[in-house]
Image (spheres, rainbow, N blue to C red):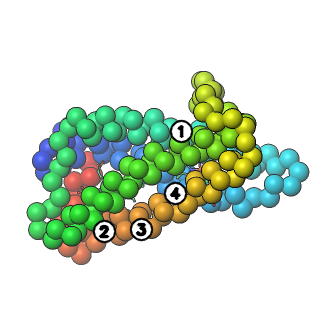
Amino acid sequence: MTSIGNTEERFGVVAILLHWSMALLIIGLAALGLYMVTLPDVGFNTKKIMLILYHKEVGLLVLVLLAARLAWRLTHVLPQLAAHLPDWQKIAARFVHLCFYALMFALPMTGWLMSSAAGIPVSFFGLFTLPDFLPHDDYLFQRLIDIHKWFAFALIPFLCVHVGAALMHHFVLKDDTLRRMLP
Ligand code: HEM
Ligand code: HEM
């Protein structure tokens, strides 16, 4: 039975649930984001508007889950990386994880700021509307679109390295790296 909290050897149920639910949401958001921006603006494209609304609400859910994840992460032990790994691989793995934490914060925040600059406040699943931290400003809106896009483009190669490394550990090196993140 997997324990609720982490141990020195493996991730616990809470960290596993947070990791996989957020992984699904983030990969889905990146795919949805890339798709929705290809839809034409001409006329009143209800499909595009609806998809952007879903993208924004689910994107904010990532920010909420990130707060829970960070709180859990900072108050619980972090399992050690496989002992046989050379130092450069340990540093690379921790570096990628750190970049993920930064991007999981920066992507929703630039999305939120972008919406403020566009003058379109963000609703959180109809429960409440988030405050606008920026005034309506078209120049800022365009720059924030660019920054949001480049953060998303930075996420993709990190994701390839991360998933590639997880699969290599499991199928080639046959160690416990992936199993530690599974129930
Ligand atoms: C199919 C996709 C994914 C696979 C197979 C995967 C696999 C793994 C595995 C095996 C670990 C444990 C590494 C260790 O031993 O420390 C891990 C940790 C981690 N993963 Fe993923 N992952 C995936 C997607 C993602 C995504 C989309 C993100 C966020 C953008 C992410 C962020 C992290 C972080 C931050 C850690 C470090 C543990 C922590 O601090 O919570 N992963 N992942
Ligand atoms: C982890 C969370 C997120 C990820 C991975 C993500 C990813 C993406 C991607 C890949 C694009 C397409 C970029 C392009 O090719 O131009 C995009 C566009 C967009 N995102 Fe996000 N996003 C996230 C969160 C958010 C949030 C929270 C908001 C708003 C509250 C938001 C608002 C937007 C908007 C409005 C666009 C369209 C920009 C345009 O008109 O070109 N995103 N996002």
- On the image, the x and y values in percent for residue 170 come to 25, 67
* 134, above or below 145, in the image: above
Between residue 80 and residue 113, name the one nearer to us.
113
Spatial separation of the CA atoms under disc 1 and disc 4: 16 Å
Q: Which residue is mark 3?
A: 160
Spatial separation of the CA atoms under disc 3 and disc 4: 15 Å
Q: Nearer the viewer, mark 2 or mark 1?
A: 1
Q: Quadrant of the N terminus?
A: top left
- On the image, the x and y values in percent for residue 78 come to 19, 46
Q: Nearer the viewer, mark 1 or mark 4?
A: 4
Q: Residues within 10 Å of mark 4 (few under 14, many from 20)?
A: some
Q: Do tag 2 and tag 1 residues touch (Cβ < 8 Å)?
A: no
- N-terminal of the two: label 3 or label 4? 4
Q: Do tag 2 and tag 4 residues touch (Cβ < 8 Å)?
A: no
Spatial separation of the CA atoms under disc 2 and disc 1: 28 Å
Q: Which residue is mark 4?
A: 151
Q: Which residue is mark 2?
A: 165
Q: Which residue is mark 1?
A: 60
Q: Do tag 2 and tag 3 residues touch (Cβ < 8 Å)?
A: no
Q: Is residue 41 visible?
A: yes
The local secondary structure at tag 1 comes to: helix
| Residue 135 figure quarter | top right
Residue displayed at 53% across by 53% down: 28
What amino acid does circle 1 point to? Leu
The local secondary structure at tag 3 comes to: helix
Can you tell me whether the CB of the residue at mark 1 lies under 8 Å from the nearest atom of ligand 2?
yes
Spatial separation of the CA atoms under disc 2 and disc 4: 21 Å
- Left or right of 21, for residue 129: right
